[in-house]
Image (cartoon, rainbow, N blue to C red):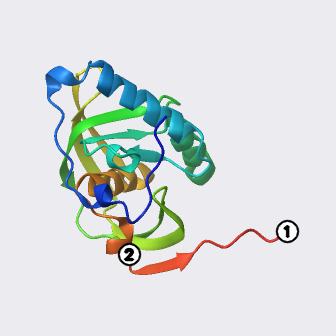
Amino acid sequence: MRQIVQTGDTILRMSAKEIPVAEIGSPFIQGLIKDMRSLLSKEEYGVALAAPQVGESLRLFVISGVAIKKRTKKDMGETEITSDDSVYINPVLLKRSRGAKDKHEGCLSVRGKWGMVPRAEKATIEAYNEHGEKFTRGASGLLAHIYQHEMDHLEGILYTDKATEIYDDTPAAE
């Protein structure tokens, strides 16, 4: 089983390679998606995972439907997002809203740290799903934030590169 790589691993700084559309249904890519979903499901605070974070320099990320639904309900009172994980293969960020707001951000590959990162409020992405079907999805709020964070991973950029403030994770008071 794959593991989530941590800061210092050179793969996190590489620009990821596109996946040939004909290979999306291959056992390798489908196994990678399965492993990524499994790893993500075990993370209490993880909402998404990019292939470079599991040691594969490929343009692929998975967003946890359960985490998004739970956080969206809690933070914004919205419930329209399903609990299915979303798979984004060869994603392209088509547009972002102008201006940026600082957003609280963490990363499964940068344990023990959090930061404030300027991110656009809205973003539109085009990608293929795990069945090789192309789709376009616009998002605002948390989902738009996730799109930008994961697209950065595919370019070898960590949130700490863009953060205006970084601080250590502090354990909850007992």
Query: Is residue 51 among the parts visible in the rendering?
Result: yes
Q: Judge whether 93 appears above or below 26 on screen.
A: below
Residue drawn at (47%, 33%), measured in percent from left and top? 37
Near mark 1 (Cα within 10 A), the count class, few <14, some 14-19 or many ≥20, is few
- Residue reaching furthest to the right: 174
Q: Nearer the viewer, residue 11 or 147?
A: 11
Going by the image, does 173 lie left or right of 46?
Answer: right
Does 81 sit left or right of 130 as displayed?
right
Question: 141 left or right of 128?
Answer: right
Give above or below for 23 relative to 76: above
Look at the picture and state if 45 lies above or below 60.
below
In primary-sequence order, the first of circles 1 and 2 is: 2
Cα separation between marks 1 and 2: 29 Å
Which corner quadrant holds the C terminus?
A: bottom right
Residue placed most toward the observer, 93 or 168 = 168
Residue type of the residue flagged with mark 2: Ala
- Tag shown at residue 163: 2
Position in image of residue 33 (x %, y %)? 39, 30
The residue under label 1 is 174
The residue located at (39%, 50%) in the rendering is 53
Relative height, residue 58 to residue 7 (above, below): above
Q: Where is residue 156 in the image (x, y as percent from the top left)?
A: 26, 59
Q: Which mark is residue 119?
A: none
Res 81 seen here: no
Could you tell me which secondary element the residue under label 2 belongs to?
loop
Where's residue 28, x and y in %? 31, 25
Assess disc 2: are there few (<14), some (14-19) or many (≥20) residues with their C-alpha within 10 Å of its C-alpha: some
| Residue 16 percent across, percent down from the top left | 21, 48
Based on the displayed image, in which of its 4 quarters is residue 118 positioned? bottom left
Identify the element where label 1 is drawn: loop
